[in-house]
Amino acid sequence: MILTVLGALNEGFLQTLRLFAVTLLGAIPLGLVISFGSMSRFTPLRWLTKTVVWVIRGTPLMLQLIIIYYIPGRVLSSSPWGSGEAGRFLASAIAFIINYACYFSEIYRGGIQGVPVGQQEAGLVLGMTKTQIFFKVTLLQMIKRIVPPMSNEVITLVKDTSIARIISMQELIWAGYAFLKGSHGYSGLIWPLFFTGVYFLLFNGLLTLLFGWLERRLDYFK
């Protein structure tokens, strides 16, 4: 029994890791792009971007996931995500990327605006272009400032992946809950569901150590 449970949980955890990794790969660069829109001097773009961020941050991720997964199929008469687990994963990834990109964008914006303007002016005096100032002055200092809030969001993302089970994506919590409903010939087993917490604790523990190491490496910006 134990081997069967661990095998199912490991499979669910791999799906959780996939969703986590894909979300970070998409949300980290997209969040930076959105932050540029939020700080744009072009007023319509700035207000449009801020409105989108406000809507995404102000509504539950679960609701966004349901809308993204079900509404296109209702409107187009056929789901653009495809069928089966691959379709549920694709819809989940898009919902998570959009959601976390909006949160990351506010962290980026705060980090960029937190860099003293005098340093940018000094770069201009030295003959640096705005692009050079951003990558060689602003970006490096921004990274130091955003590591703590970004680490909080990344750890929250690990736990939020369990929301994907609302559209029956077979992630870690779904795998544990399946034994309570009668999966793999077992029914009424509740301990596999609680045991999923160990996976989350261990993975978040590793991430905590990683971000702690990263903060120490960036101490030279003090």
Image (tube, rainbow, N blue to C red):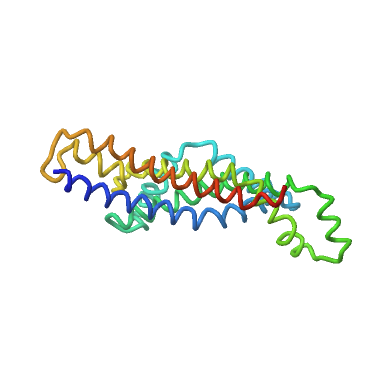
Q: Position of residue 220 (x, y in %)?
A: 69, 52
Does residue 190 appear left or right of residue 53 in this picture? left
Does residue 12 appear left or right of residue 157 in this picture? left
- Residue at 61 percent across and 48 percent down: it is 216
Q: Residue 150 falls in which quadrant of the image?
A: top right
- Residue at 67 percent across and 47 percent down: it is 109
Q: Does 109 appear above or below 197?
A: below
Q: Position of residue 138 (x, y in %)?
A: 73, 55
Q: Does 181 appear above or below 121?
A: above
Q: Nearer the viewer, residue 210 or 57?
A: 210
- Residue at 42 percent across and 51 percent down: it is 20
Q: Position of residue 112 (x, y in %)?
A: 71, 49
Q: Does 159 appear above or below 142?
A: above
Q: Nearer the viewer, residue 59 or 131?
A: 131
Q: Position of residue 99 (x, y in %)?
A: 50, 46
- The residue lying furthest to the right in this view is 125
The count of marks equals 0
Q: Split into 4 quadrants, where in the image is the N terminus?
A: top left
Q: Residue 54 falls in which quadrant of the image?
A: top right
Q: Does 52 appear above or below 126?
A: above
